[in-house]
């Protein structure tokens, strides 16, 4: 049982390049989330999903897109990377026991992205 | 608006000493409250959570937190800190009726021998 895994762990991009971050969970969780973590700002929600085929915007969605084609996977895309997107990105998931946002979230190890 | 404040950016305690990390929230109704811990290079792990009931909540690794409605606080405590507790700690508040979990900026704990 791997929990939540993220690929890749590190990445360096040039401004304007695109990339996709992959999140996978093997706990059969309904809810999945993408956060970014910046110094002194805690975690901020980018997008989230309440189930396969559904996504919704979080607090800071601009410049990102997401897809949830399979229940276990949640992809975060950057179409045209900007230096402001340099951050550590965390994926999380939680079960459908309680209303979304009220249950324990299980986090992946993070992806450190640098945009030059 | 919903918000979480962790007043201390970093705290240093001696190994074996007691610890209290502060968390204050702003939310109109009874919130769902969480404390997470992040070790270097790792994701966040839940320490404990409060939904309702007993205002003193026990968590993993010997941590506890007390919900005080009158003070809008949910402070994390540990009676005796171990060197392995050095990490960053995040308080978070959530509500139902649409996903909204807000994380505090975090408090980094340093433990000295």
Image (cartoon, helix red, strand yellow):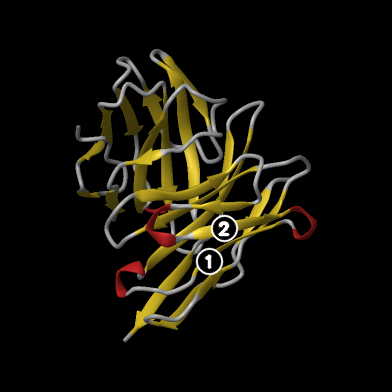
**Neighbour class for label 2 at 10 Å: few (<14), some, many (≥20)?**
many
Nearest the eye: A18 or A96: A96
Q: Is residue B100 above or below residue B76?
A: above
Q: Position of residue B108 (x, y in %)?
A: 44, 70
Mark 1 chain = B
Kindly indicate the quadrant of the structure image that contains residue A75: top left
Q: Chain of mark 2?
A: B
Horizontal and vertical percent position of residue B98 = 62, 27
Q: Which residue is mark 1?
A: B77
Q: Position of residue B79 (x, y in %)?
A: 48, 72
Image quarter in which the N terminus of chain B is found = top right
In the image, residue B102 above or below residue A32? below
From mark 2 to mark 1, how far is it between C-alphas? 6 Å
Q: Nearer the viewer, residue A10 or B44?
A: B44
- At horizontal 43% and vertical 74% (from top left) the residue drawn is B80
With respect to residue B62, does B84 lie above or below?
below
Q: Quadrant of the C terminus of chain B?
A: bottom left
- Estimate the x, y position of residue A78 in percent, counting from the top left: 34, 36
The answer to which of B70 and B93 lies nearer the viewer is B70
Left or right? Give the position of B49 relative to A93: right
Q: Height in image: A97 above or below B40?
A: above
Q: Are marks 2 and 1 in contact (CB under 8 Å)?
A: yes
Q: Residue at x 27, y 58 (%)?
A: B41
Please give left or right for residue B68 compared with residue A100 in the image.
right
User: Which residue is labeled 2 in the image?
Assistant: B65
Mark 2: secondary structure: strand
Residue in the image at 28% along x and 32% along y: A23
């Amino acid at each position: 049982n791997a929990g939540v895994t993220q690929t890749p762990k590190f990445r360096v991009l040039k401004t304007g390049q695109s990339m996709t971050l992959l999140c996978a969970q093997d706990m059969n969780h309904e809810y999945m989330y993408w956060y970014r973590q910046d110094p002194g700002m805690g975690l901020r929600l980018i997008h989230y999903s309440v189930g396969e085929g559904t996504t919704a915007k979080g607090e800071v969605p601009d410049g990102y897109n997401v897809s949830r084609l399979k229940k276990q996977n949640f992809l975060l895309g950057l179409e045209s990377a900007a230096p402001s997107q340099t951050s550590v990105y965390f994926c999380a998931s939680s079960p459908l026991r309680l209303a979304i946002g009220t249950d324990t979230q299980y986090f992946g190890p993070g992806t450190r992205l640098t945009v030059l | 608006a919903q918000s979480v404040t962790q007043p201390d950016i970093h705290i240093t305690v001696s190994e074996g000493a007691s610890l209290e990390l502060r968390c204050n929230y702003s939310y109109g109704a009874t919130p769902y409250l969480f404390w997470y811990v992040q070790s270097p290079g790792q994701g966040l792990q839940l320490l404990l959570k409060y939904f309702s009931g007993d205002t003193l909540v026990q968590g993993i690794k010997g941590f506890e937190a007390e919900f005080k409605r009158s003070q809008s606080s949910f402070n994390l405590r540990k009676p005796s800190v171990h060197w392995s507790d050095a990490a960053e700690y995040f308080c978070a508040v959530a509500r139902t009726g649409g996903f909204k979990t807000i994380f505090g900026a975090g408090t980094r704990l340093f433990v000295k021998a």
